[in-house]
Image (cartoon, helix red, strand yellow):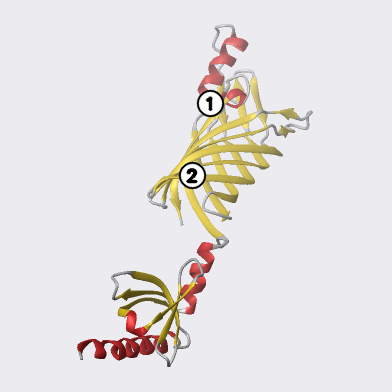
Amino acid sequence: MRNAMRIPVSCICVVILSIAASEPGIARERSDAVSLKSGSVINGRIIEISPEGTLRLETSDGSILAFRMAEIQKISRECAQSTPQESAGKDSAEGTEPLQCRYALTGGIALPTGDFGSVMSGAAKPGFTLGAEFELRFSRNVGWVTQFNFSDNPFDEQAVHDVLTGFMGGGYDIGLSLNAKPWLSYLCVTGLKASAPLSPGFTVFCTGAMGVFIGTAPEITVSTYFGSFTQESATASAFAYSISVGFVIGDIFRCDAKYLSATPKYSQNSGDPVEQPTSIVLVEVGVEF
C-alpha cells in the first residue's frame, strides 16, 4: 500500500511544478533529479509525463530518456527564477558587454622636463595641474579616452636673474630685476586606454593619446639701471601626444603619471616665431565614477 501511494504523489508533484514553470512573465532554469528504485539518480529536465504513467527526461547532452512511474522512487526539482529584465541582463553578460561611460577628476603637480625646465630655454618651475577624463569603455580591459589638462608652471625668475647678471654685468651691479608671469598649458588629447585588474580592488592601466596643446608664454619684464624691456605674452598651439600609466583602487581612487610633449611656436614682440619644446610630467591623484 505504501508503494502504491508513492506513484500518484510523485505525479501530482510533477504536474504542480510543470504548471508553475509555465507562469507568464517569469523565466526559470530547471534542474530535475529522478531517483530510481534501483538506486540510480538521473539529472536533466522533465519534458513530458504521459497519462499512461511514463516520464520523459532530457539530459544535459540532449538525450531523451523514458521511465515508467513504477520505476521511480522520488522526483526533486530546483527552480531558479528571474524576471525578464534579469534574464536580459544575464544574456548581455554572457554575450557582448554593454558600453560603459567613466569619468575622472584629477589634480597634482606639473614637473617641467628637458628644454622646458632649462634656465637657457623655458626656465619653467614645478607647478600644479588640474585634469578631467572621459572614457567610453568597450570592455573590461579596453576603452577610448579623451583627456583635458590645465597646468600652471611659474617662471624661474631667480635662476634667470643669476644667469643674466653674470652675462650682462660681468660681476658688476647693473640693477637687474625680473618680473614674469607663469607658463600656462592646455592639453586636449584622445586615444586608447588598456586596463588590467590585478585583484578585485586594484586595477592598473596605461593610455596613449594625441591631440592639441595650447600654451601661453609668460610676459617678462627686465629692468636695469639703463632701462627696461618687456617681452610680451604670446599664445600658440601645436600637435601633442601623451603617455600615462597608473592604478585605480576600489574602482574609485586613482593615481597616475602622465608625460606630455609638444613644440609650439611663439611669436613675441612681432619677431619671428620661436619654437619652445614643452614637455611636462604630470603626477595626479583623483577619483573615478
Is label 2 in contact with label 1 (beta carbons under 8 Å)?
Answer: no
In the picture, residue 285 is in which quadrant?
top left
Number of residue marks: 2
In this picture, is 231 found above or below 38? Answer: above
Mark 2 lies on residue: 196
Badge 2: how crowded within 10 Å, few (<14), some, or many (20+)? some
Whichever of labels 2 and 1 marks the residue nearer the N terminus, that label is 1
The residue nearer to you, when weighing 27 against 60, is: 60
SS class of the residue under badge 2?
A: strand
The residue nearer to you, when weighing 49 against 113, is: 49
Can residue 80 be seen in this snapshot? yes
SS class of the residue under badge 1?
A: loop
User: How far apart are the two marked residues, 2 and 1, measured between alpha carbons?
Assistant: 40 Å
* Amino acid residing under circle 1: Asp
Badge 1: how crowded within 10 Å, few (<14), some, or many (20+)? many
Can residue 235 be seen in this snapshot? no
Q: Position of residue 228 (x, y in %)?
A: 64, 25
Q: Residue at x 53, y 26 (%)?
A: 156
**Residue farthest left in this picture:** 2
Q: Residue at x 52, y 68 (%)?
A: 91
Q: Position of residue 74 (x, y in %)?
A: 29, 79
* Amino acid residing under circle 2: Ala
282 on left or right of 237? left
**Quadrant including the N terminus:** bottom left
The residue nearer to you, when weighing 145 against 77, is: 77
Q: Position of residue 22 (x, y in %)?
A: 45, 87
Camera-nearest label, 2 or 1: 2
Mark number displayed over residue 156: 1
Mark number displayed over residue 126: none
In this picture, is 270 found above or below 25? Answer: above
The residue nearer to you, when weighing 107 against 92, is: 92
